[in-house]
Amino acid sequence: MKVEFYGHVRQYNNIKSEIDRNMQEVLLSGQYVQGPMLKRFEAELAAYHGTKYAVGVGNGTDAIWLALMALGIGPGDEVITHPNTFFATAEAIWIAGATAVFVDCCPKTKCICPANIEAAITPKTKAIIPVHLYGQCADMVAIKKIADKHHLKLIEDNAQAIGAHGPNFKIGQLSDAATTSFIIQKNLGTFGDGGALVTNNPDIDAQVRKLRNHGSTARNVHSYGFNSRLDDLHAGVLSAKLKHIDAWNDDRRKWAARYTAGLKDCKTIDLPVELPGYRHVFHLYVIETKKPEWRDQLLDYLVKEGVDAKTHYSIAIHKQAGYPWGKGARIVGSLANAEANAACCISLPMFPELREDEVDYVIAKVKEWDAKMASQAPAGKGPAQSGKTCPVCS
């Protein structure tokens, strides 16, 4: 059996008529950039998040750095985040001209650990960017308290967790802005690139709208800005898909539960954790081998057996070749949890249109490898971690 990692074509075929109808509407309107379909989708996206505003931009990276710029964050400022995420999170900080400050993640959720944030704050600190990694929210209640105490801005990198929430909060509710990516791999993805920002702050909304469109608020009138617009064809695709996102996330959760039930007795891997009261939407279902040297062995075995498993963020940002390029970076404390996550992670196929037989085949192949390795050597305790107690998962 072959089990693909993505289900893009299956998803398109399932709602082809809805997507095609929206795209046809755009094509026949003759308005392809900042036209009525974009305005409609922005209104729908804001309503979905329960925020006052949503702004479509060119991609998820732009959404972060335009949010930083709208908040006046740039050269001489510091922004705290964590390094076991996609490079674009830090890249956006550097594009804005600020310094990225890396702290360690929670050993269970892999999201930024609130216990590590305060030690990293200096007079130069202006913002925190928590990443809702793999589809589970960071602890926004704890992070919000820290931000308020130190008068810091808060931007959520929500590229992976649309539709997720915590026990007492929704994404976008506790921050100055929440950004997202619509590249096709995401839970809500278009046929290409795209991004957006949601906010309750009218000044951020106005500034990002201006910045995305060459600094223009009226025809032929320009100030400082860029070209970062979500076009109407992509907005039409996203509008059609947004109506299904909760059902699709339910399916992701169903497959995640099946993976977890099937793999819970494995001795050589750790499984993802969903904290009580949180809604994890499983953009990725990431397992971790208990020894770093086992990661590539398991990955190679799965690929050889027809399972299109992958690694995501297998080199932490502070270990990347592009890291020194950043316009300043600082590390505070140990990054042992982030480094262990990067060294041991494997993403199993995860998309709503998976079938039971495909999920069961993946489970069977992981268990085959686990049984073989467990019989050869004890699994041990897994990669070294920081030893700090995380208030989120303790």
Image (tube, grey):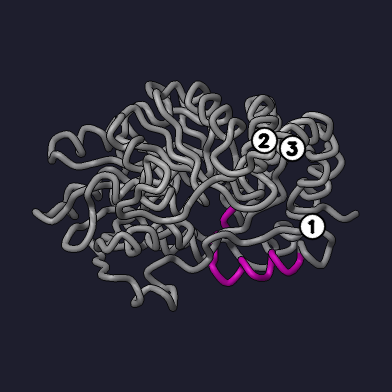
Residue 298 highlighted magenta (yes or no): yes
Q: Nearer the viewer, residue 305 or 133?
A: 133
The residue beneath circle 2 is: 236
- Amino acid found under the numbered disc labelled 3: Met
The residue beneath circle 3 is: 23
- Amino acid found under the numbered disc labelled 2: Gly
Residue 258 seen by the camera:
no
User: What residue lies at 41% left-to-right and 28% top-to-bottom?
Assistant: 53
353 on left or right of 378: right
- Amino acid found under the numbered disc labelled 1: Val
For marks 1 and 2, give the one nearer the viewer.
Answer: 2
In the figure, residue 217 lies in which quadrant?
top left
Residue 294 in percent (x, y) is at 61, 68
Quadrant in which the N terminus is drawn = bottom right
Q: Where are the magenta residues, as a range? A: 287-301
- Is there CB contact under 8 Å for labels 3 and 2? yes
